[in-house]
Image (tube, coloured by chain):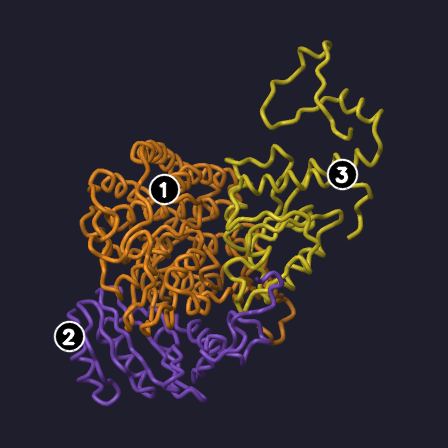
Amino acid sequence: MDVTEILKSLTGRFPEAISEAIVESEIRARAYVDKDGVKEVCQYLKDSLQFDHLCVVCGVDYIKRNEIEVVYHIASYNHPVVLMLKAILPRENPEIESIVSVYWNSNWYERETYELYGIVFKNHPNLKPLILPEDMLGEWPLRKDYKGFPNKTARNLV
Amino acid sequence: MEERLEPNEMIIHLGPQHPMQPGPFRLNLRLKGETVVDADIELGYIHKGIEKILENKTYLQGITIVDRICYLVALVNEECFVGCVEKLLDIEPPERSKYIRVILEELTRIQSHLLGIGEFAEFIGFVSMFMYAIRERENVVGLIDMVTGARITHSYLKFGGVRDDLPDGFKEKTLSVLNGLKKEIDNFEQMFHTDRIYRERTVGVGVLTADAAKNLGVSGPVLRATGVPFDIRKNEPYLVYKDLDFKVCTETAGDCFARVQVRLNEIRESIYILEQCLDQIPEGPLFPENSLYGRRTPVMRVPAGEVFHRVEDPRGEMGMYMVSDGSDRPYRVKIRGPYYPTLQALPPLIIGTTVADVASISGSMDGCTSEADR
Amino acid sequence: MGEVKEQKTSTSDETSVEEVPGVITTTASAISDFLKKTKAQDLINWGRKNSMWFMTQPMGCCGVEMIAMGCAHYDTDRFGIIPRNSPRQADVMLISGYVTKKYLPALKRLWEQMPSPKWVIAIGDCSISGGPFYESYSTVQNIDEIFPIDVFVPGCPPRPEAMLQGFVELQEKIKAKKDLGTEY
């Protein structure tokens, strides 16, 4: 499948939810997605455009803009195009729809993004910490204003 | 897992300490008799916060940190990180450097698969096989050591090239090691095919169909054992893989036996790739000419932008998403390890099997917990 | 003193074994001679130092080297150093990597499960001083305040030869020990 065709089909189907769709190269494309329409867009990508492989879900904290972005990289087992979808959330109480019902393996990625950034994924089957100890929940260590980062407890620091 | 148990049910915890899995994780199994009713995985026992550390290190310092994401495949991790930065800087290594990288990454693939096969054999009680595999692995690690000067954490790739050239006598030594390895792989295969106990522990155990595997999002040998020819080296060729002749190894059964068979075949393909590379490798500089980048990398400011780069790890698809804001440190690096989705797919696979098969299925995934935890 | 040496006597020429480098062979008469002129303490130490079974629990990069060390190529069995999977059967715990906040309770539990006398070896920079992850939010620093570490083996990761050297240093330490060493 050609990357321009994919973007044309996507923007034609969701004129409101998809914005700023750009072709970066033959195998890369990116677009912004509205935070309410993520699940429908993913469902359409999986069913109609052969995007059946979710690479990764992650968060990026843009502290200057006071925004958090959730970034989805969606690829396919059949063609080499990787589509990057971004959803912009406010830094206070970020919430977005979970896509576990579409891509099964987004389960752990969403749990990890939740505990590291504090992004709540609505309708997630089991939203609890995955890799951090329970008592660190609420510190959101990967946010840029996290205080505990250079850990000063090492005794033999110069 | 926390609701009341029925009278004949119990919960056992496997881990977090595992004798052979390189890295601790915890597997909680809810059993009814000997059958697994429910399974749950706890991660994070060796979570180091690599993504946060990378944001606070310069790009050059970052190379030493990404080595330690998964220490079995350090060079492939470096390739992914360096590839991201090279895409952002818009530089390309010269031909000789690309060949050296391919040679070292295929050697890494061989040693990782050998350790994976050996570990799996150890998991199901075939300890002598473990010793055979490690014996062969030492020779391959010795070759990598000869070039990079380290056994498992190398810091060998640089932006736009590699740190050192191949030493004298590398080709002859490599060919002799590979010739010995070919015979050993045939031996291993014969052992696996004829051992009745081994076949009973693996054939038909942990069967994954192609549709289920795609749905679970796995990649690498676990996916290829189900018959899906998904390989980043073919789908999205990087370095010089599009000039090289190799095939994607697949099996159709999708059970533990097929996964080990895929790894054995991939070692053979890697040997074939290595022989081609050693024949074809051109002479030339290690770094692009008329550029700032060389063995002594300057203080770098990488142009602002975002990139997602994928490489083929021995365990599957490895990707990195890097955001740069124009300073000398990355703004955000997200590491997409191949073992993370594979480990996630473990509970659906082991539910319904018996406890004895859990070790077999888990071992056939060729785990590296460190990369899942990061 | 305190060491069993191979003694070749003229009467045991036909039973004497071939010399293998790195392997100490003992005969019954040598042990008997040794028992006559030694203290019980030396005997106990000799026994302990020649059967150090270590617990395999790979925790990081050093764990891979630890696996390689226990296997055929480096062959620690010739020193009586044998990998064991259960803490109940182990004498030496290797802290082979970064200790995180989440793993520390489990590691303490493993240490408590080991029977005395027991020793700890800290392998790699991560367990000695934090290594490359000294500023991480998730790892625990200053491991030597938590476990009574006997030998430090630096390196990131140390080569298997260095780990073997660490074990040899521990043997020296055990040989010089004066108490019964049952309490920790």
Residue C176's tag is 3
- The residue that appears at 56% across and 41% down in the rendered structure is C162
Q: Quadrant of residue A81?
A: bottom left
Residue C170's tag is none
The residue pinned by badge 2 equals A4
Image marks 2 and 1: residues in contact by CB distance under 8 Å: no
Identify which residue, B106 or B248, lies in the foreground.
B106
What's the chain of the residue with tag 3?
C
Position above or below: C2 against A115: above
Colour applied to chain A: purple
Colour applied to chain C: yellow
Q: Residues within 10 Å of mark 1 (few under 14, many from 20)?
A: many
Position above or below: B373 against A61: above
The quadrant the N terminus of chain A occupies is: bottom left
Q: The disc labelled 3 sits on which kind of residue?
A: Ala
Residue B147's tag is 1
